[in-house]
Image: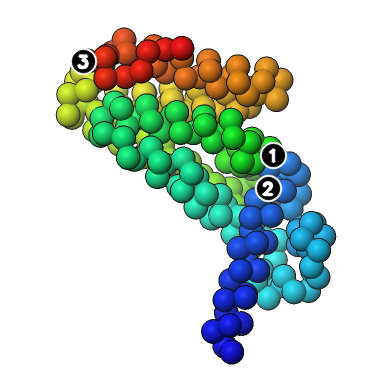
Amino acid sequence: MTDGRLVRGERTRSAVLEQALLLATVSGLDGLSLSQVADALGVSKSGLFAHWRSKEALQLAVVDQARAQWTEQVIRPAMTAPPGVRRLWAVHDSRLAFYEAGVLPGGCFFANAHFEFNARPGVVRDRLAAELTDWMTFLTGLAAEAVTIGDLPAGVDPGQLAYQIEALGVCAVMQSPVLGTETTCRQARRSLLEHLRAVATDPTILPEPM
């Protein structure tokens, strides 16, 4: 019976976090409340207090949920690509595919949350900053690996390339409500492909720009 309650509790927690993540991309992370999530799920607000005692605790849990989703749907598929410039490209392509699929109604949880909390000191902003640092370190590491194995020449700055990739991804998702996701993602893909093919030691291992 105890195990059954634990399983049901974990299922409830997962369902709440999935719904909260969806709502946060539309209403904002700061606009998120236990009442809002409870109403969306058709459950009592009091039942959610067993999992999160404060709005801040819920916000931090949603950040963790967003990271887990990003890892599973963006990073993991891309890591099946061969190491080097092809894996670097695969991460960018996978990210744009995630946006195109409309998984989150507000486009990108992290892009939205960073803009929302950049000027708000506190534990939520600190957690978001740590997530961004981890992401940029990951991209920089992929770029450095491409240099190390010879896919990119030694003169390429991995940190600068990671910054360019991140800028293209954020620009694509933030402009998509106005210009259309198909247009912005196509432009973001083409921009990176043209750049990578221009600097790669063997551009033929990368797709042709569409």
Is tag 1's residue or tag 3's residue first in the polypeptide sequence?
1
User: Which element carries disc 1, helix, strand or loop?
Assistant: loop
Which residue is drawn at the image coordinates 23% and 20% (left, top)? 152
Is tag 3's residue or tag 2's residue first in the polypeptide sequence?
2
Name the residue nearer the viewer: 40 or 145. Answer: 40
The amino acid pointed to by label 2 is: Leu
The residue identified by callout 1 is: 105
- In the image, residue 13 sits, relative to residue 179, either above or below, namely below
Which residue is drawn at the image coordinates 75% and 74% (left, top)? 47
Residue 17 visible in the current orientation: yes
The amino acid pointed to by label 3 is: Thr
Quadrant of the rendered image containing residue 177: top right
- In the image, residue 43 sits, relative to residue 116, either above or below, namely below
Name the residue nearer the viewer: 174 or 41. Answer: 41
The residue identified by callout 2 is: 22
User: Which element carries disc 3, helix, strand or loop?
Assistant: loop
Residue 131 visible in the current orientation: no
Q: What distance separates the C-alpha of mark 2 from that of mark 1?
A: 7 Å
Q: Measured from the top left, where is residue 101 in percent x and y?
A: 59, 35
User: Which element carries disc 2, helix, strand or loop?
Assistant: helix
Q: Measured from the top left, where is residue 66 in percent x and y?
A: 56, 49
Q: Is the C-beta separation of discs 2 and 1 under 8 Å?
A: yes
Name the residue nearer the viewer: 28 or 205. Answer: 205
Q: Measured from the top left, where is residue 141 in percent x and y?
A: 30, 36
Q: Residues within 10 Å of mark 3 (few under 14, many from 20)?
A: some
The residue identified by callout 3 is: 201
Which residue is drawn at the image coordinates 18% and 29% (left, top)? 148
Horizontal side of 130 relative to 79 (left or right) equals right
Q: Residues within 10 Å of mark 1 (few under 14, many from 20)?
A: some
